[in-house]
Amino acid sequence: MPDNLDTGLVIALIVAIGIAAQWFSWWVKQPAILVLLLAGLLAGPVLGLFDPDALFGDLLFPAVSLGVAVILFEGSLTLKFREIRGHGQVVTRLVTVGALVSMLLIALAAWALGIFSWKVALLFGALASVTGPTVIVPILRTVRPTRSLANILRWEGILIDPLGALAAVVIFQLVALGTRQVEDLLLAVEIFGAGIGLGMAAAFGLSFIMRRHVLPDYLHNVTTLAVVLLTFSLANALAHESGLLAVTVMGVILANTKDVNTDDILDFKESLTVLLTSVLFIVLAARVPASAFEMNWTITGALLGFIIFVARPVAVMISTIGSDLPWPERIVLSWIAPRGIVAAAVSALFAIELERAGVEGADILVPVTFAVIVVTVFVQGLTARPFARLMKVADPEARGVLILGGNPLAQAVALSLKKLDIDVILSDTSWDQIRKARMAGLRTYFGTVVSDDADRRLDLVGIGELLALSHRAPLNALACMRYAGEFGSGNVFNIRLADQAESATTPAGRVLFKDDVTLERLEGLIVKEGFEIRHTKLTEEFGFQQMLDSQSEDSVLLYGVSNEGVVYPFAEDRTFRATAGWRIAYLGHPDHSTREDTEKSAAERARAHLCEELPKPLPD
């Protein structure tokens, strides 16, 4: 780093580069961790633009430690025990037996190849076995595998993230610190006692305060952050390296405590985690010494090959014994296992500690771990889609619809699509609206569709369109911009609100319906005048023009569904040709019916009429 550069300017540049890397990752639909690590390696050992140790000095280790503590707490806050039980035997085995098998195999290979001592090899095995939603979700959205396979991969990533972090912390304390003497064993007991005890105390104390409403809502997030940092630091002060265990235990307990709403905390921690990961990974990657690139890449390549082609497949095959998962899905499941944030952040933190303790092999723990991350994310990200298509476990086309909003119009549209066997997800931040939708049998997502939580938990497999129907114009616009890259700019639709119609403001995305149709008007027709969404099936005798001629003046065309099951919302700039077999949805008054009944074709009505005219048989 040039001496004449201001330290504040360098830190600001690191933050700017990190956020730019996050944006670029979103744009190219690749996990952000890959771009962040490459940016750090380029700025540090490759070009020598800055030296983190010289820049931060003695503050480097405390800053990294606190940042990792927040990341692990946020990950553990998503671990709910009911989710482990609720997603099948395969997922449960993958995050328990499968993770253990993978860890032991990787550790054995790293030790046998002479890369690490057996203690560091076991720690590396725990780190290299963890995937994570931040790297799995972007790949799933590109691959679009079958629903069963997508659910297994997604929930494995969500659950193994905090479990893997906890396992790595435990192994670090038990193995890396050593248990050869009675004093060391007592030290391990002290570490576990302090970590678990303080984590439980902090979780129960914070949940008690939140349940009793002692704090105002706007202080929940910052108070939680303060408690996390204080718990981590206090645990480390009582027992060396017990802080990570303490914050992980704290997050798991809070996530599974009844009557404690962690959604707002998660939203805040997600934004903070994005900032922390953006800075941490650049800084940590920049710390990798240039000499690390001189390690034996033949042996390292052999280890990477073993991890990808042996350890993961063996773990998957053992985890799927006795299950009804088809073999093609098992094979693809064996291939997709990119490593993520936990492996990078925790390995870098532990490496600093191990280097201070003079443990052999600590200097190459980070480079080898980063190599695993880069290779698995890059190789599997590029090959997962063609491999899944080769194995015939990838959906050919995403035809489902994501609806933003839980108001009466949004729910009516969602139910009408569901009646036509269209896959629908309805999202809203109002629990009452989500509850109504669930009671109506709709798939729902409770939260904001533009959040990091949605990136992890919102199952978009089979979903290819967005209908932004909420009353919040900024959220509608943001969702359209967010999912234009996901679904394509031609498949995101936004409804005009009353204030936008009056100000002639053009909403983001493709504008739904006619220029005088607003969300408020459609809601008024449904709630106040009892309008309903009806479906008309077009035939050769009763085509689209005949259906239009039969419509009343106050009815509104909503969407058409083609013979292939593709949804075509009526928009200002959209034209399409609806032919026989299409179904047209419109909002109409219950007392008005078109010449074509919503459930019967013209031919069916003619047959029914003919049957009424025929004489009935005489009784015997």
Image (cartoon, rainbow, N blue to C red):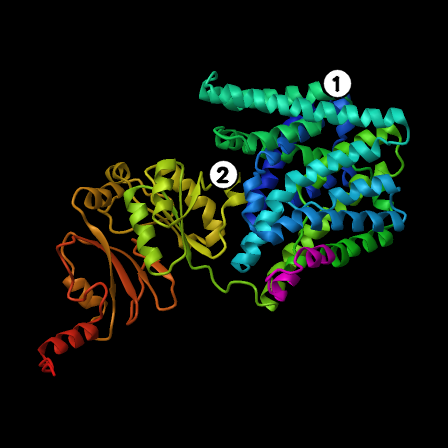
Residue found 14% across the figure and 77% down from its top: 611
The local crowd at label 1, few if under 14, some if 14 to 19, many if 20 or more residues have their Cα within 10 Å, is some
For the N terminus, the quadrant is top right
The image quarter in which residue 464 lies:
bottom left
**Image marks 1 and 2: residues in contact by CB distance under 8 Å:** no
Q: Give the image location of residue 274, x and y in percent.
A: 59, 35
Query: Is tag 1's residue or tag 2's residue first in the polypeptide sequence?
Result: 1
Q: Nearer the viewer, residue 204 or 360?
A: 204
Query: Farthest residue toward the front?
Result: 620
Residue that numbered label 1 is attached to: 238
Question: How many numbered circles are shown?
Answer: 2
The image quarter in which residue 605 lies:
bottom left
Taking 65 as reference, is 474 left or right?
left
Residue that numbered label 2 is attached to: 451
Q: CA distance from mark 1 to mark 2?
A: 37 Å
**Three-letter code for the amino acid on which mark 2 is drawn:** Ser
Residue found 51% across the figure and 19% down from its top: 209
Q: Give the image location of residue 67, x and y in percent.
A: 66, 28
**Secondary structure type for disc 2:** loop
Which residues are drawn in magenta?
313-331
Q: Give the image location of residue 293, x and y in percent.
A: 83, 45
Of labels 1 and 2, the one closer to you: 1
Q: Give the image location of residue 122, x and y in percent.
A: 81, 42
For the C terminus, the quadrant is bottom left
**Three-letter code for the amino acid on which mark 1 is drawn:** Leu
Q: Main secondary structure of the magenta part?
A: helix
Q: Nearer the viewer, residue 215 or 497?
A: 215
